[in-house]
Amino acid sequence: MRSYFNFTLKGIQFLPVWIGFFFFFLIPVQLMLGALNELIAIDVPADGASKDFFLYLIIVLLTSFIFIFFIAKLVIGSIEYNGIKIKCDYNIIKYLGVVVSGLFLSIITFGIYIPWFIRRRRSTFRDYDANHFWLVFNPWNHSF
């Protein structure tokens, strides 16, 4: 039986993403947890609670979405169908625009916007893949 799909991702291609994940996500999470402990401590300093927690929270949120983008780009770009790789020319600026505006609108609307934010974030990948996949792998186009 012939296999039409092939997955060509190697572990070495993930290494830079995981190194970045360690330095730009896990370390800020630890800093955020330390700032959170200071924020909820019984002995609050005289100058008030630390504002570093919110800075670390923003960094962690943005880096998590950036890593989702790069991992999805690696995984989708390594799929082959009939020996042809699926092309993924995603735009990180467009994706970050969706993420930043979605996070902002979710905060402003007290979470009411979250379902639309999830839909818009997923559609940045899905719409391009569906259109591009159909153009490249059209069953009536026998030239692929």
Image (cartoon, rainbow, N blue to C red):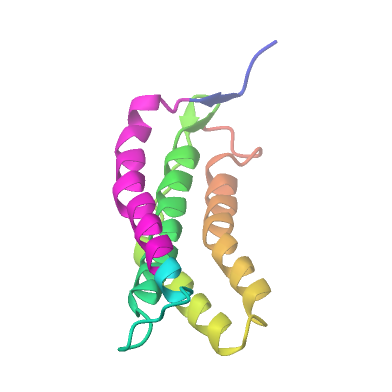
Q: Position of residue 115 (x, y in %)?
A: 68, 72
Residue furthest to the front = 43
Q: Position of residue 93 (x, y in %)?
A: 35, 67
Figure check: 125 above or below 138: below
Question: Which image quadrant is residue 81 in?
Answer: top right
Judge left or right: residue 19 versus residue 29: left
Residue at the spot 54% in from the left edge and 51% down from the top edge = 129
Q: Nearer the viewer, residue 2 or 72?
A: 72
User: Is 31 inside the magenta-drawn segment?
Assistant: yes
Residue at the spot 43% in from the left edge and 75% down from the top edge = 39
Q: Position of residue 36 (x, y in %)?
A: 44, 69
Please name the predominant secondary structure of the magenta segment in the image.
helix
Residue furthest to the right = 1
Residue at the spot 47% in from the left edge and 79% down from the top edge = 101
Figure check: 34 above or below 55: above
Figure check: 11 above or below 136: above
Q: Position of residue 5 (x, y in %)?
A: 59, 26
Q: Nearer the viewer, residue 92 or 55?
A: 55
Can residue 95 be seen? no
Q: Which residues are magenta?
A: 8-35
Residue at the spot 45% in from the left edge and 25% down from the top edge = 8
Question: Which image quadrant is residue 127 in?
Answer: bottom right
Can residue 141 be seen? yes
Figure check: 3 above or below 45: above
User: Is 136 inside the magenta-drawn segment?
Assistant: no
Number of callouts in the render? 0
- Locate the N terminus and report the quarter of the image it occupies: top right
Judge left or right: residue 32 versus residue 23: right
